[in-house]
Image (cartoon, grey):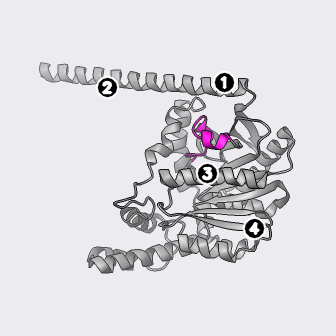
Amino acid sequence: MVFTLKLLKVVCILVLVLVVLLLAIRAVNQYLIAKEGNKLEANGGLSELVELEVNGTKQYLLLEGKKKEKPIILFLHGGPGQPFPFGVSARGAFPQITEDFIAVYYDQRGSGKSYHKDIPLDSMNIEQFVKDTDVIVDYLLERFDRENVIIAGVSWGSIIGTKYSQSYPTKVHAYIGISQFVNDVENQKRAKEWLTEIASSEKNEKMLNDMESLEEPPYFDEKDKMLSKYISKYGGDNYSDQFVEKASIYGLIAPSLISPDYTLIDLYKAMISGATFSLFKAKDLQKEMKQLNLVEEVRELQVPVYIFQGKHDKITNYELTKEYTESLIAPAGKEIITLEQSAHYPNGNDLELIFTKLKEISLKEF
């Protein structure tokens, strides 16, 4: 008994030491990142956290760029409720972007630093997110005396970005979609067909039965979880093979762990409470996303369009997105850039390809 108590005491001390050590490492990294941000501003650049009142809620932006006269690119992160990697916690994380742009990293309504427990559930709808985006854009246009910005929507954020570009074309210089969303019912249908083919080729009776039990989409709750589990198992969200490495999920969230703009409470909101609120409690938003069909709702965009899509993506299906982009009426031009090594999450090589293309876009468009 005495030995057990002593062992427990030692374990508790070791855990405490480990926690203190991790917090110290976090604090050192926060200091270094903030120091680089201060240096950027001292040299005429920008590295600033901004709090705004947006349609009844406090929301947060991080503005970062090497030169203030560069074009503005507003990132609309994925999720909903998952502000990684292009949210407020991205200070210092993407010098490849801030070299050529003023990057605006934005924690959306209900996400990360912008999550508050008093956000009305009935405000969690696509129209409201578009309205929020317009407040952000107007702030940027007024502050920097610009006529328009580039909108970059990632996965869920591509819904907001596409809708915003349709509604406010004069405020958008170009639209960039990364893992572009089109129609979730069709995404699920094609994912089920793909998985059924795999199950048949592997003679996997359990998987075949599971696919049959799904019936017809849309899928919610347990059925959605089952489909997602199989998509993940076969690399439809994060692709790899003998020549290709997976995207590092840790690498996507790592900046948030050491961000000087995230308190530990903010980190909890980004990973737990905000994600739970947006993904599970906001059930009407989930239903709205399932009903959305951009093929019918957004047939034309009056701005230049650039779509980056993973060739192996089964969450926002590559072929579906390609078909949509080809059918989209875009008088100002359109281009789909295939990420050959990626599924839904761009891996390291394809992320560098995105950065390279962004530089080309900045040179071409400006």
Question: Can you give x and y, in whole percent of width and height, for residue 26 in the image?
Answer: 48, 27
In 3D space, how far apart are the residues under numbered discs 3 and 2 (Cα atoms)? 43 Å
Q: Which kind of residue does numbered mark 3 sit on? A: Thr
Tag on residue 356? 3
Select label 1 or label 2 by which is in front: 1
* Occupied quadrant, residue 215: bottom left
In reply to whether residue 136 is colored magenta, the answer given is no
Toward the viewer: 192 or 307? 307
Tag on residue 39? 1
Question: Can you give x and y, in whole percent of width and height, for residue 116 in the image?
Answer: 63, 41
Q: Which kind of residue does numbered mark 2 sit on? A: Val
For the residue labelled by badge 3, is the local secondary structure a helix, a strand or a loop?
A: helix
For the residue labelled by badge 2, is the local secondary structure a helix, a strand or a loop?
A: helix
Q: Which residues are magenta?
A: 83-99
Residue under the image location 50 percent in, 65 percent down: 315
First of labels 4, 2 by sequence position: 2
Toward the viewer: 241 or 316? 241
In 3D space, how far apart are the residues under numbered discs 3 and 1 (Cα atoms)? 25 Å
First of labels 4, 3 by sequence position: 4
Tag on residue 333? 4
In 3D space, how far apart are the residues under numbered discs 1 and 2 (Cα atoms)? 36 Å
In 3D space, how far apart are the residues under numbered discs 4 and 1 (Cα atoms)? 38 Å
Residue 185's place in the image compared with 105, above or below, is below
Question: Can you give x and y, in whole percent of width and height, for residue 301 in the image?
Answer: 77, 68
Tag on residue 12? none
Toward the viewer: 231 or 185? 231
For the residue labelled by badge 1, is the local secondary structure a helix, a strand or a loop?
A: helix
Q: Is residue 116 visible?
A: no
Residue 39's place in the image compared with 312, above or below, is above
Tag on residue 15? 2
